[in-house]
Amino acid sequence: MDGADPILLELYRHRFEGVADEMGVTLRRTSYSPNIKERLDFSCAVFDGDGALVAQAAHIPVHLGAMPASVDAARAAVDAWAEGDVVVLNDPYEGGTHLPDVTMVSPVFVGDADTPAFFVASRAHHADVGGMTPGSLPLATELVQEGTIIPPVKLYEGGTRNDALLRMLLRNVRTPDERRGDLAAQRAAHSVGAERLQVLTSAHSATEVTTYARHLQAYSERRTRAALADWPAGTYAFADELEVQGDETATIRVTATVDEETVTFDFVGTDEAVDGNLNAVLPITESACYYVVQGLTGGDIPVNAGSLAPVSVTAPQGSLANAEAPHAVAGGNVETSQRIVDTVLGALAPALPDRVPAAGQGTMNNLTLGGARPDGSPFAYYETIGGGMGAGPGGDGLSGVHVHMTNTLNTPIEALEQTYPFRIVAYQLRPGSGGAGRFRGGDGLVRVYELLVPTTATMLSTRRVRGPWGREEGEDGAPGRTVLVHPDGTEEELPAHFSRQLPAGSRLRIETPGGGGFGVPNDTAG
């Protein structure tokens, strides 16, 4: 094992993961917004001095391949690092994913070294960063409409905060106090991560700790290559559709090539970027592919630069899977990422029929609500809503869960109603929405919001026309629905993407998709 002691290797795996986990605990406990504190919409990670991923806590899959791009962008933007520096960014075309995901990157110095031995990074979804509508997921056609764009820039330099930059950022959001608190929580997480790494190097020497970071990366690469070597070599293709607006759809197409110890995903044939906000930057596409490989190779391989190395992802520039500025991208991170996962799984199904499940709900059902409370103070709420998981070769899909690229919790009703001027009048499973099959797809959810003040509501969703596909003759899951119940009781079915000004007394009923079924249903078999 290249001179690595296997017991020490396992210890260092958990030590590095423990640093990222403790960063996450700090971020959660010190944050202000329910989206971070309750839903856990954040990720924390440790990188080596060259910017290669060492460990990432089990937070959000969509951040898996994207956070390394953020660290690369931060390192490229800084000529010389100093103790106490913190770079902040959210620009999707300079290391970010979409504007609400604000990333911080900090160097970690050990001993007398004048260059960083490690970097720590965090990414948190901020419930509002400006833009056309509260929640910063507007139905935009270019990036500048989606919110405040932050290129990689030092928010702290040598431990001193750049107050002018902070004032500028807070002046361009609807909820500045909440943003100030969440940014401070991210920095607190970095302080904890740096301290834990410094304690680790003091106890075991910088040489040993950095050496075992490299050993761990090499170990993960060997494990991943060995797992890929068991996949049937060949070329496999699949295509799926993404609802853009109305009857308009865009096609995502992938060709997966399994060759000995590597796999390549090529998105040639994917449609060009669209006029709306469903475009994905390449790190999002990479994240989706890494997530699928991680899941299909057993899931117990440490996630780091080594486990990602045998996976290659290419997509035509300017396509839906590799958008270029100034295209809007808010929905690419949350919706297109889900469809890319479905497409990659569909491609690999013939190669791994005993592992690949039917399609899950395939959407995050993104809802943002915003306006002013009765006392005049602003509010901005964001949530993704779970649905049905696809059934698999070994059993039914789970019901009412977040699927694939989101790994968040729901926001507890008590927390919502204490914080925002709306109430939840129903929250339940959606019986029968899972696709029939030898194994049934999981059921979706029904969540009903009653608005107590005039509110701007914006919804980004997909799988509203065709439900998630089944496998091996299993039936499709039911597509989702969003219904507006007006104050007079009349109902109006809304499209997959909408932004509306709604009066007090309105109710939004969101019915999320069920998962696809797997295998011939028992009542039709034979």
Image (tube, grey):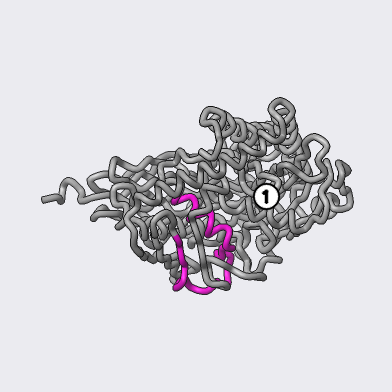
Q: How many marks?
A: 1
Task: Identify the residue under disc 1.
Answer: 51
In front here: 139 or 152?
A: 152
Residue shown at 39%/59% (left/top)?
A: 258
Which percent across, then down, holds residue 256?
40, 62
Furthest toward the left, the residue is 526
In front here: 262 or 215?
A: 215
Which percent across, then down, holds residue 179?
75, 45
Q: Above or below — where is 278 with respect to 87?
A: below
Is residue 73 found left or right of 463 in the rendered image? right
Q: Above or below — where is 28 with respect to 402?
A: above
Instruction: Please indicate, yes or no, whether residue 231 appears anywhere in the rendered image.
Output: yes
Which percent across, then down, holds residue 472?
25, 54
In front here: 195 or 356?
A: 195
Residue shown at 53%/28% (left/top)?
A: 7
Judge whether residue 280 is colored magenta: yes
Q: Quadrant of residue 204?
A: top right
Furthest toward the front, the residue is 3
Disc 1 secondary structure class: loop
Is residue 183 found left or right of 230 in the rendered image? right
Instruction: Please indicate, yes or no, whether residue 417 appears anywhere in the rendered image.
Output: no
Which percent across, then down, holds residue 333?
57, 57
Residue shown at 53%/59% (left/top)?
A: 285
Q: Quadrant of residue 465?
A: bottom left
Judge whether residue 184 is colored magenta: no
Residue flagged by tag 1: what amino acid is it? Answer: Gly
Residue range highlighted in magenta:
264-293
Q: Above or below — where is 481 with respect to 379?
A: below
